[in-house]
Amino acid sequence: MMNIMAICGVAVVTAVLALMLRSQSPHAAMMMSIAAGILIFLYVMNHIPDTLFGMSDMLSSSGVDPTKLTILFKVMGICYITEFTCDCVTEAGLLSLATNLSFAGKVLVLLSSLPLFEQIIGVIQTLGGSS
Protein backbone atom coordinates (compact mmCIF):
# COMPACT_ATOMS: atom_id res chain seq x y z
CA MET A 1 0.00 0.00 0.00
CA MET A 2 1.29 3.40 -0.92
CA ASN A 3 2.36 5.51 2.00
CA ILE A 4 0.69 8.85 1.40
CA MET A 5 2.39 10.32 4.47
CA ALA A 6 5.82 9.68 2.95
CA ILE A 7 4.73 11.20 -0.36
CA CYS A 8 3.31 14.28 1.36
CA GLY A 9 6.41 14.52 3.56
CA VAL A 10 8.68 14.61 0.52
CA ALA A 11 6.45 17.25 -1.06
CA VAL A 12 6.37 19.49 2.04
CA VAL A 13 10.12 19.22 2.70
CA THR A 14 10.83 19.98 -0.95
CA ALA A 15 8.46 22.95 -0.92
CA VAL A 16 10.09 24.43 2.21
CA LEU A 17 13.62 23.91 0.85
CA ALA A 18 12.66 25.29 -2.57
CA LEU A 19 11.10 28.40 -0.99
CA MET A 20 14.25 29.02 1.08
CA LEU A 21 16.48 28.44 -1.96
CA ARG A 22 14.36 30.42 -4.44
CA SER A 23 15.70 33.85 -3.44
CA GLN A 24 19.34 32.79 -3.93
CA SER A 25 19.00 30.41 -6.86
CA PRO A 26 15.62 30.21 -8.60
CA HIS A 27 16.90 27.64 -11.10
CA ALA A 28 18.13 25.32 -8.37
CA ALA A 29 14.79 25.65 -6.56
CA MET A 30 12.94 24.77 -9.74
CA MET A 31 15.19 21.77 -10.41
CA MET A 32 14.70 20.58 -6.83
CA SER A 33 10.94 20.83 -7.26
CA ILE A 34 11.00 18.94 -10.55
CA ALA A 35 13.33 16.28 -9.12
CA ALA A 36 10.99 15.73 -6.17
CA GLY A 37 8.05 15.50 -8.56
CA ILE A 38 9.84 12.88 -10.62
CA LEU A 39 10.78 10.98 -7.46
CA ILE A 40 7.15 10.93 -6.30
CA PHE A 41 5.99 9.98 -9.80
CA LEU A 42 8.42 7.03 -9.93
CA TYR A 43 7.38 5.91 -6.44
CA VAL A 44 3.73 5.91 -7.45
CA MET A 45 4.49 4.22 -10.80
CA ASN A 46 5.81 1.21 -8.87
CA HIS A 47 2.28 0.65 -7.60
CA ILE A 48 0.48 1.19 -10.91
CA PRO A 49 0.81 -2.41 -12.23
CA ASP A 50 -0.88 -3.86 -9.12
CA THR A 51 -3.66 -1.31 -9.41
CA LEU A 52 -4.17 -1.97 -13.12
CA PHE A 53 -4.19 -5.75 -12.64
CA GLY A 54 -6.73 -5.41 -9.85
CA MET A 55 -8.96 -3.16 -11.94
CA SER A 56 -8.56 -5.39 -14.97
CA ASP A 57 -9.52 -8.51 -13.00
CA MET A 58 -12.53 -6.77 -11.51
CA LEU A 59 -13.73 -5.37 -14.82
CA SER A 60 -13.05 -8.54 -16.82
CA SER A 61 -15.22 -10.53 -14.42
CA SER A 62 -17.98 -7.99 -15.07
CA GLY A 63 -18.15 -8.97 -18.74
CA VAL A 64 -16.94 -5.63 -20.13
CA ASP A 65 -15.24 -5.85 -23.54
CA PRO A 66 -11.43 -5.94 -23.03
CA THR A 67 -10.97 -3.54 -25.95
CA LYS A 68 -12.89 -0.90 -24.03
CA LEU A 69 -10.72 -1.50 -20.97
CA THR A 70 -7.55 -1.08 -23.02
CA ILE A 71 -8.83 2.23 -24.34
CA LEU A 72 -9.78 3.33 -20.82
CA PHE A 73 -6.33 2.51 -19.41
CA LYS A 74 -4.59 4.15 -22.35
CA VAL A 75 -6.61 7.35 -21.94
CA MET A 76 -6.00 7.40 -18.18
CA GLY A 77 -2.27 7.05 -18.78
CA ILE A 78 -2.24 9.85 -21.34
CA CYS A 79 -4.12 12.11 -18.93
CA TYR A 80 -1.88 11.44 -15.93
CA ILE A 81 1.39 11.72 -17.84
CA THR A 82 0.28 14.86 -19.67
CA GLU A 83 -0.88 16.56 -16.46
CA PHE A 84 2.35 15.70 -14.64
CA THR A 85 4.49 16.97 -17.52
CA CYS A 86 2.40 20.14 -17.91
CA ASP A 87 2.85 20.87 -14.21
CA CYS A 88 6.63 20.43 -14.49
CA VAL A 89 6.81 22.64 -17.58
CA THR A 90 4.61 25.28 -15.93
CA GLU A 91 6.85 25.18 -12.85
CA ALA A 92 9.76 25.90 -15.18
CA GLY A 93 7.92 29.03 -16.32
CA LEU A 94 7.14 27.79 -19.83
CA LEU A 95 3.39 28.35 -19.83
CA SER A 96 3.09 28.40 -23.62
CA LEU A 97 4.79 25.01 -23.90
CA ALA A 98 2.55 23.64 -21.14
CA THR A 99 -0.53 24.87 -23.00
CA ASN A 100 0.62 23.20 -26.23
CA LEU A 101 1.41 20.00 -24.34
CA SER A 102 -2.05 20.04 -22.78
CA PHE A 103 -3.62 20.45 -26.20
CA ALA A 104 -1.55 17.55 -27.56
CA GLY A 105 -2.71 15.37 -24.68
CA LYS A 106 -6.35 16.22 -25.42
CA VAL A 107 -5.90 15.35 -29.09
CA LEU A 108 -4.29 12.03 -28.16
CA VAL A 109 -7.18 11.25 -25.80
CA LEU A 110 -9.63 11.98 -28.61
CA LEU A 111 -7.70 9.83 -31.08
CA SER A 112 -7.40 6.97 -28.59
CA SER A 113 -11.13 7.01 -27.89
CA LEU A 114 -12.29 7.10 -31.52
CA PRO A 115 -13.20 3.38 -31.49
CA LEU A 116 -15.57 4.06 -28.61
CA PHE A 117 -17.17 6.94 -30.50
CA GLU A 118 -17.68 4.63 -33.49
CA GLN A 119 -19.41 2.08 -31.26
CA ILE A 120 -21.60 4.76 -29.69
CA ILE A 121 -22.62 6.06 -33.13
CA GLY A 122 -23.44 2.48 -34.17
CA VAL A 123 -25.67 2.05 -31.11
CA ILE A 124 -27.40 5.37 -31.82
CA GLN A 125 -27.99 4.37 -35.43
CA THR A 126 -29.37 1.01 -34.33
CA LEU A 127 -31.71 2.65 -31.84
CA GLY A 128 -32.77 5.23 -34.42
CA GLY A 129 -33.51 2.58 -37.00
CA SER A 130 -31.01 3.77 -39.61
CA SER A 131 -28.22 1.60 -40.94
Image: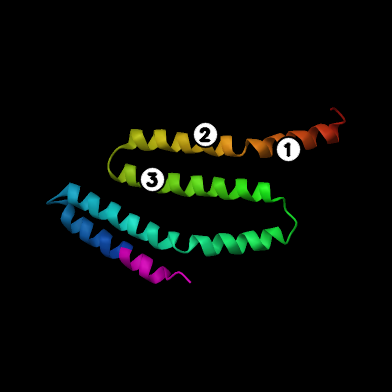
Looking at the rendered structure, the number of numbered marks drawn on it comes to 3
Residue at x 68%, y 36% (from the top left corner): 117
Which residue is at 16% across, 56% downward? 21
- Nearer-N-terminus badge (2/3): 3
Q: According to the image, label 2 marks what residue?
A: 107
Q: Position of residue 78 (x, y in %)?
A: 50, 45
Q: Residue furthest right?
A: 129
Q: Camera-side residue: 6 or 112?
A: 112
Magenta region = 1-10
The answer to which of 20 and 40 lies nearer the viewer is 40
Q: Point out residue 106 in the picture as x, y percentages from the top left corner.
A: 51, 37
Element carrying mark 2: helix
Residue 46 on image: x %, y %: 44, 63
Query: Which of 24/55 is in front?
Result: 55
Name the kind of residue labelled 2 in the image: Val
State the CA–CA distance, disc 2 to disc 3. 16 Å
Q: Is residue 68 left or right of residue 81?
A: right
**What amino acid type should be assigned to the residue bearing mark 3?**
Thr
Horizontal relation, residue 67 to residue 12: left or right: right
Q: Is the residue 76 above or below the residue 10 in the image?
A: above
Residue 4 belongs to magenta span: yes
Label 1: which secondary element: helix
Image quadrant holding the C terminus, namely: top right
SS type, badge 3: helix
First along the sequence among labels 1 and 3: 3
Count neighbours of disc 2 (C-alpha within 10 A) and say few if under 14, some if 14 to 19, many if 20 or more. Answer: few
Label for residue 120?
1
Amino acid at pointer 1: Ile
- The residue drawn where x is 58% and y is 39% is 112
| Relative to 33, residue 106 above or below | above
Q: Residue tagged by mark 3?
A: 85
